[in-house]
Amino acid sequence: MLGLKLKTDPRWANLAEKTLEEILTDHAYCEQKAATSGISLIQMFPEKEKMVDEVVPVVAEEWGHFKMVLDELKKRGLKLGRQRKDIYVNELLKFQQKGGDRENVFIEKLLTFALIEARSCERFRILSTNLEDEGLRQFYHTFMISEAGHYRMFLNLAEEYGGKDKVQKRWQEYLEHEKGIMESMELRGDRMH
């Protein structure tokens, strides 16, 4: 369904479970960044009314997810740590086509967001099926469902605004590039991506 070219090794969940405070901290900041990215998209392209209408509820949901992760940390007696550099996202941002017209910039942003949501969905599925802690499995199942919807929304918006054939060609390029990013990155349990 997600089209990712390289699946995450399911053993990643075991690494994440061993570094629970770190993975929850990273997850919290991912949710916060997703909310602020949605706000930035609206600020940059307010004329895209359909996008604005669809992204506004996602911003609210992502901010709610940030609070949910904070609550989970507190419930477990853990602390929110410092935000770390997100190498995965930074590598995706480098792949965005620079310059060109506003429409191209808009489509590139939508595709980047779609890919981040797709990988997050895949990672949440792994956590929801492989963690030993039943409560955490349920916790991450909720996030998995949400991220799948966000992934589809961003990809659908890109196709609607940019044309399905053109966007699908570029989407395949993104998927191939993302595969290379994943192959080059160390599998770490303290990071969502």
Image (spheres, rainbow, N blue to C red):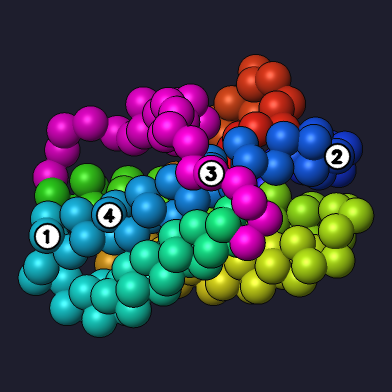
Q: State if disc 3 and disc 2 touch (CB < 8 Å).
A: no
User: What residue is shown with label 4?
Assistant: 36
Instruction: Describe the element under mark 4 as helix, strand or loop.
Output: helix
In the rendered structure, which amino acid carries the disc numbered 2? Asn
Task: Name the side, left or right, on which 181 lies relative to 40.
Answer: right
Q: Is residue 142 above or below residue 82?
A: below
Task: Indicate the quadrant where residue 128 lies.
Answer: bottom right
Which amino acid type is marked by label 3?
Lys
Q: Which residue is mark 2?
A: 14
Q: Sequence-wise, which precedes: disc 2 or disc 4?
A: 2
Q: Residue at x 63, y 61 (%)?
A: 75
Front disc: 2 or 3: 3
* Amino acid type at mark 1: Gln
- Quarter of the figure with the C terminus: top right
Q: Residue at position x 80%, y 36% from top?
A: 18
Name the N-terminal-most of marks 4 and 1. Answer: 4
Label 1 or label 2, whichever lies nearer to me, is 2
Instruction: Give the Cα separation between the discs numbered 3 and 1.
Output: 32 Å
Whichever of labels 2 and 3 marks the residue nearer the N terminus, that label is 2
Q: Residue at x 44, y 55 (%)?
A: 31
Magenta region: 75-101
